[in-house]
Image (cartoon, rainbow, N blue to C red):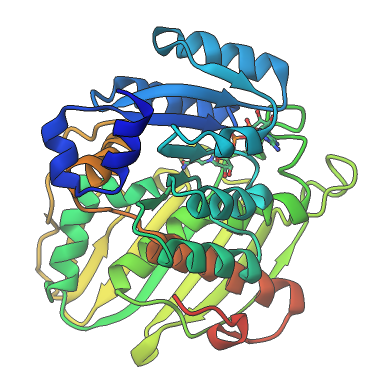
Amino acid sequence: MAIERRAFLIGTSAAAFAQSGSTVATAMIGTGNRGTHVLRGVLEQPNAKVLAVCDIKPDRLDNAASVAAKDNPKTYRDWKQVIDRKDIEAVFIATPPHLHAEMAVAALQAGKHVYCEKPIGVTAAQVRNVVKAAKNTKRVFTAGQQLRSHLQMGEAVSKIRGGLIGNLLMVKAQRHANGDLPHDGSSGDWYFDVTKSGGYLIEQSVHNLDVCNWVIGAHPTKACGFGAINLYKNDPPGRTIFDCGSMTFEYPGGVQMSFTQNVFHPRGLQGGGQLVLVYGSKGAVDLMYAATLYPMERDGKPQVIAEKREEKTHAHTTAFYDAITKGGPNPADVTVGATAALTAILGHEAMTRQKVVTWTELGVEV
Ligand SMILES: NC(=O)c1ccc[n+]([C@@H]2O[C@H](COP(=O)([O-])OP(=O)(O)OC[C@H]3O[C@@H](n4cnc5c(N)ncnc54)[C@H](O)[C@@H]3O)[C@@H](O)[C@H]2O)c1
């Protein structure tokens, strides 16, 4: 497709795009662990073509170029050169978290569709900038909160939101891992620095916190909590992120959400470390992957409220392209991405400041 034609298509409706049978010219910025995984998903899409891959590490860049060899992408070390390309229509951002906002804002302002890995920002100011840029454009912005594309969980969430367990009263959620991320692994050069990753809550638990917001149908109004480094003291050297923490979030209507995180949860304990239990006036649901309802009555039998489906590995990426080319639903738009990141930032602020922090104090309208 000629550049002029592509430029024309960007300005037309998704329906017209669908009829044209065109592909979306795509660039990948950050081709490490996650970026390469997502790249494989992009290459599976019938309506995508990878024209550019970008990373500051030569080995990652070479690897991405060979993974995407069928599309013969150009390689870049400087992400700004990628954004400057007028023929690029969609940009994936999978760099370390503290870089997301600047890159996403620049891409949106240059008229690109953006798929930005979670968290979309590690500070409230960064999130605010992304929200503003995304709301100022008609381009698609999708946050990498891919649990929003999980079909079984989505069905269970809509049943709970539809009143299946009565009034929501409380959620107990956790993200416990059976180890730290490898200290010398691919993310070791940024993950343990709180200014770059935001810490375990903002970088990882943002997925679980997003599920809590999704099922409650709101964002928290305030949070309090504590965090600590209890096992990995100064390990790796200079570590500034907690290895455990415990928080309480309050939601509208007084709904309580209790959240814990740690990196020393042995395999197999309690069925693994991730949990979202949703309590309502008529019963409780084990939401994370199980979708099982436990009725309140003494002799009530547990029942599965959403059957297991074939969950496609790259469903979220497919949804992003469908939103661009067919006007399909965007499962994690900027409001979802910002709300998830801000919930994590709220919890992190509460733990580090050791005081109650309100949503309003974050100063971002989502
Ligand atoms: N959605 C998910 O389930 C999921 C899973 C894992 C990671 N992630 C997210 O993906 C992001 C990347 O994580 P990862 O595990 O792939 O880390 P990683 O360290 O393996 O990859 C990050 C890559 O970005 C590159 N990079 C750094 N600065 C850059 C720059 N200025 N320009 C271009 N490239 C640059 C690095 O060289 C590296 O290759 C993080 O935000 C992480 O939270 C999401």
309 or 341: nearer the eye? 341
Q: Position of residue 162 (x, y in %)?
A: 12, 73
Q: Position of residue 56 (x, y in %)?
A: 72, 27
**Residue shown at 37% from the left, 72% from the top:** 171
Q: Is residue 283 left or right of residue 128?
A: left
Quadrant of the rendered image containing residue 333? bottom left
Q: Quadrant of ligand 1?
A: top right
Classify 330 as above or below 249: above
Q: Position of residue 35 (x, y in %)?
A: 52, 30
**Residue shown at 55% from the left, 24% from the top:** 53
| Residue 53 in view, yes or no | yes
Classify 274 as above or below 126: above
284 or 89: nearer the eye? 89
Quarter that holds the C terminus = bottom left
**Residue shown at 38% from the left, 29% from the top:** 3
Q: Is residue 38 left or right of residue 96?
A: left
Quadrant of the rendered image containing residue 24? top left
| Residue 308 in view, yes or no | no
Classify 234 as above or below 314: below
**Residue shown at 83% from the left, 48% from the top:** 239
Q: Position of residue 246 (x, y in %)?
A: 60, 68
